[in-house]
Image (tube, helix red, strand yellow):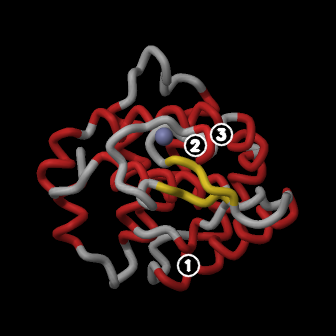
């Protein structure tokens, strides 16, 4: 099993097991690649640290961010919480009726974008994430049920903080469509 595997973006099931109605053929599909190894994640994280410094004009000390994340065993923490995070993101796409209307998109389209954001995040492809993807993950946290996903849970908090770091780092880059960001933001 190497190479990307297709999943339904709406129900998150392997495509052959999906029973969702009303999704146009060939849409609402996300491809998940096999997970990178710990070493690969480490390299990606280091790359993120170096890139962030460069892109954000020194607003962030990327090396310090990476050092702190590694000290707190963030790679392991994220891996341990993948399922939870995915569930949260799935719930989020169902809650965003207002946003769907505003952007004139269907639920499966939002689900696809959110799932891609989720996949990139857990694979540590943080450099490749767009600000919109960070904002969506951030929103997923903000709107989540605090009883189910309490932010005094240290691991969830660490993940939320990492999303915020990524979001802020990318937001300091000059090439961002700010208006689109504003329409997405819940803060
Ligand atoms: Zn489905």
Query: x, y (%) of residue 73?
Result: 78, 45
In which image quadrant can residue 27 be found?
bottom left
Task: Tell me where residue 40 appears, x and y as whole percent.
Answer: 82, 66
In the structure shown, which secondary structural element does the residue marked by tag 2 occupy? helix
Q: Residues within 10 Å of mark 3 (few under 14, many from 20)?
A: some
Residue 123 lies, in percent from the top left, at 68, 59
Q: Nearer the viewer, mark 2 or mark 1?
A: 2
* 105 left or right, relative to 51: left
- Left or right: 150 with respect to 92? right
Counting other residues with Cα less than 10 Å from the Cα at mark 1, is it few (<14), some (14-19), or many (20 or more)? some
Residue at 63 percent across and 72 percent down: it is 48
Structural distance between the alpha carbons of marks 1 and 3: 27 Å
Determine the residue located farthest toward the top in the rendered image: 147
Task: Indicate which label's residue lies in the foreground, 1 or 3.
Answer: 3
**SS at mark 3?**
helix
Judging by the rendered image, the residue that carries numbered circle 3 is: 82
Q: Which mark, by number, is residue 53?
A: 1
Residue at the image point whose x is 57% and y is 73% from the top: 127
Question: Are the two marked residues, 2 and 1, in contact with CB atoms closer than 8 angstroms?
Answer: no
């Amino acid at each position: 099993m190497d190479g990307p595997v297709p999943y339904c973006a709406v129900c998150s099931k392997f495509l052959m097991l999906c029973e969702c109605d009303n999704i146009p053929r060939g849409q609402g599909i996300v491809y998940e690649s096999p997970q990178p190894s710990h070493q690969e994640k480490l390299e990606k994280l280091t790359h993120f640290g170096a890139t962030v410094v460069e892109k954000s004009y020194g607003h962030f000390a990327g090396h310090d961010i990476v050092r702190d994340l590694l000290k707190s065993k963030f790679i392991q923490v994220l891996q341990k919480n993948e399922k939870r995070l995915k569930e949260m993101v799935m719930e989020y796409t169902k809650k965003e009726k207002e946003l769907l209307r505003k952007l004139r998109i269907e639920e499966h389209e939002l689900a696809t974008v959110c799932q891609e954001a989720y996949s990139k995040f857990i694979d540590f492809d943080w450099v490749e994430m767009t600000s919109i993807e960070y904002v969506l993950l951030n929103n997923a946290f903000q709107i989540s049920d605090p009883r189910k996903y309490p932010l005094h849970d240290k691991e969830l908090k660490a993940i939320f903080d990492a999303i915020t770091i990524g979001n802020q780092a990318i937001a300091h880059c000059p090439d961002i469509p700010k208006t689109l960001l504003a329409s997405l933001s819940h803060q």
